[in-house]
Structures are given as C-alpha cells and as structure tokens.
Image (spheres, rainbow, N blue to C red):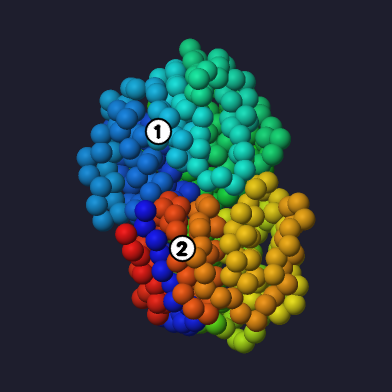
Amino acid sequence: MDKIIVEGGKQLKGAVRISGAKNAVLPVLAATLLTRGRNIIQGVPKVRDVATMIKLLEDLGVEVESYHNEKIILDTSRADNPEAPYDLVSTMRASCLVLGPLLARLGEARVSLPGGCAIGERPIDLHIKGLEAMGAKITLEHGYVQGKADYLKGIKFYFDTVSVTGTANLLMAAVLAEGETILENAAKEPEVVFLADILNLAGAKISGHGTDIIAIEGTTSLKPIECTIFPDRIETGTFMIAAAITQGDVTIENCIPKHVEPISLKLQEAQVGVEISKNKIRVKSKGPISCVNAKTHPYPGFPTDIQAQFMALMTLAQGQSIIVETVFENRFMHVSELKRMGADISLDGHTAIINGVKSLSGAPLMATDLRASASLVLAALAAKGSSIISRVYHIDRGYVGIEKKLSKLGAQIRRIK
C-alpha cells in the first residue's frame, strides 16, 4: 500500500484550485439510474469513491461511454440489473444511494449493506423505513437489503435524525413515485440542494430543498442529466486549515465561500487572517493561533468532516480548546495518532479537550478513515521532523492528488509505493 512522507516545518504559500465535490457527484451518479439515455457530468473529481460508484453503475448495466478531463458520459438505457454487490458496496457507504433509484426504476433492488469509513454505525434504518412507507416490501437477508415494489406512492415522512444520504435516497425514489411526498427534518446540505436542482432540470418537481421541509410531486419519467459539479467544501476547508497550521499564506481558488462560512468564522476567531472574495478565499497567518471551541452540527453548522482537521490545528493553539462531536459516535480515532506526535488531548465521551503545545514532532502514523487521514497530513506539515503516514488509500477516497497540490504550495511531501 502507498505511504505519504512529510518533512514538516514548511510554510505553505501560493494558490490551490479546489476539485469537484465528492459528496455532490456520488448522489448525482446514482440519480442517473432514474433516466434512460446519455447523461453528461462535468467537474467529476478523480477520487477512489467516484471510481467505486462508476464501477457499481457498470455492474448495474450502465455504459460508460467516456471518462476523461473530469467529464463523464453515462448511457443508462440498459441499466436493468437490480443487484449492487458486496465487494463494491462494502467499501463505500454512499453506494446505498442506488437503493431508491433502483426501486423507482425497476421495482426491485438487492443492495449489500454498506461499508465505508469506520466512524460509527451510520445505519440505513431511515432509508428502509421511508421506502417501506412508500410501498416497498423490504427484507434483510444474508447481508443484503432486498426490496420489491409494484409502484412507489407519495408519503409524508419525518426524519428522526437529519440524514444526508437518507434525504437523497428518499428524494430520488419520490421523484418517480405516484403523488406527492413531503420530507420533514430533511438535510439542508449544499449537496442535497444541488441534487434537487439537477433533478428539477431533468424534469422533476421538487420544492423546499435547502429548508427543513422538501416537497416532491412525482412524475413518470426524467430526461438525462447534464450538469457540472460544484467545488468541494471539505477540500476547501482542509486547505484553509493547512494554510493556518503551517503559518502560511494560501489563496484557495474555485471555491464557494458561503459553503465554508463556519470554518472561516472559526479561523478568524483563532486569529487567522481570512479574506473572502467571490470564488476565492485567502488564508494568511497573523501570528500565534488562539484556542477556539467547536461543536459539529449538520449544515449550516460546523461540519463533522472538518472536525479532525480543526483538531489538528487546535493542538498548536495557545490555551485549551474543546471540540464536541454530535454527528458520529466514533469520530475521534485520529486522537491517538495526534497524541503520538506530542499533542495533549483527552477524551470524555463525545468531547475532546485539547491543551495546545508549542510544537508537534514527526512520527510514523496510521490513517483510520478519510478525514482522519487528512488531519494527520496537516499535523505532519506543521510538525518538526519527518512523518510517514500509512494506509493513505483512505485519503484517496476524497482528495484529488493532495500530496501534489500541497507540494506546489511548498510542502515537502511525497508518496511512495
């Protein structure tokens, strides 16, 4: 497996361009199953999760006509296989997004229970509950979710907890259901809003997306999808923190500042300079980092996908900071690795208490999940000495050539096979 080697202590300077949003393209790829014809998607990031989703669509009968220069053309005319196999779904939880579209398109689906990062159970109970209410008969057998439906009907459904993939799955199923569906306590993430906008362009009738209540009036068919994926807000936030933790000066280009407002505000609270323009953010060190508390929430709150990276920054802040994780129950696995670098962190349930230290030291490190691996890279950039990060296939799930982008900013970083 590949490893990343980092020689710490280099200030990052220059400009970096953000790639398309992984968490936006995955549901859009699943949504192509609702169509029959040539779908054209641009701005597709070449990350492992996208490759997995494309392979899954091919298994379902989708033809990949071309995929180069971040543009993919998919022909869904003959996508008539209802089974999403274990070997693909087990590596990426977002694979469960094909469940709703398959039931809507074929009236049946057999989808392996999902895997992905080990950051908590993340059950799909709400997906199943909603689809059953829409008329699907669902059983769990031999590790697979098996569903059948003569037709799906519109419903009123309340999410007990906010679920991004649950909202997306029921949203896609409802587009081709009979009658009106109302989703309450729905996710408001930009990725969900984008999916609804794209489906509307294809002929769906969705309103209220971006609020707690989404209304979907079912229709009989959709046109093929044509769209360009917007910039990744988590990659944006990661590079913002990379600039701050190295006491650098970095301009992040091709980003949407509104999507990362909570991160900008926290960095400013930490006495880091943040200058915002239309589609650029400049992050510039102004001296020592101040301690800041943070608590993760669904959008528009502070994102759980930035918690690990922000914690890495707080290990070098002056004073004590407290970070509370409210979204996933097991998302502090990076703590033990940061402590091996000299960080002073203690855990109390879902709360991390960080006492800032003067410096971190390089060490052999083990990545445990996608965002934890990013936090270790950031910590290594600021540490004294050399760090070797193993199991970096995690970081390849969501970042396009992160070591290449960091190297262009002046980081001493390389990948070895």
Q: Position of residue 77 (x, y in %)?
A: 28, 28
Vertical relation: 160 (above or below) 219: below
> Is label 1 in a helix, a strand or a loop?
helix
Total residue callouts: 2
**Is residue 266 rendered to the left or right of residue 241?**
right
**Sequence-wise, which precedes: disc 1 or disc 2?**
1
Q: Quadrant of residue 237?
A: bottom right
Vertical relation: 233 (above or below) 42: below
- Which residue is at a point 22% across and 44% down the rendered structure image? 66
Q: Nearer the viewer, residue 331 or 215?
A: 331
Q: Quadrant of residue 109?
A: top left
Vertical relation: 402 (above or below) 62: below
- Which residue is at a point 40% across and 77% down the rendered structure image? 412
Q: Position of residue 176 (x, y in %)?
A: 47, 26
Give the residue pinned by disc 1: 87
Vertical relation: 303 (above or below) 186: below
- Which residue is at a point 62% across and 43% down the rendered structure image? 120
Give the residue pinned by disc 2: 389
Q: Nearer the viewer, residue 61 or 10?
A: 10
Does the rendering let one see residue 329?
Answer: yes
Q: Which mark is residue 316?
A: none
> Is label 2 in a helix, a strand or a loop?
strand
Q: Position of residue 67 (x, y in %)?
A: 25, 47
- Which residue is at a point 52% across and 52% down the rendered structure image? 369
- The extreme bottom residue here reads 287
**Is residue 318 rendered to the left or right of residue 340?**
right
Q: Position of residue 299 (x, y in %)?
A: 63, 53
Q: Quadrant of residue 162?
A: top right
- The extreme left residue here reads 65
> What's the CA distance linking mark 1 and mark 2?
26 Å
Q: Amino acid at mark 2?
A: Ile
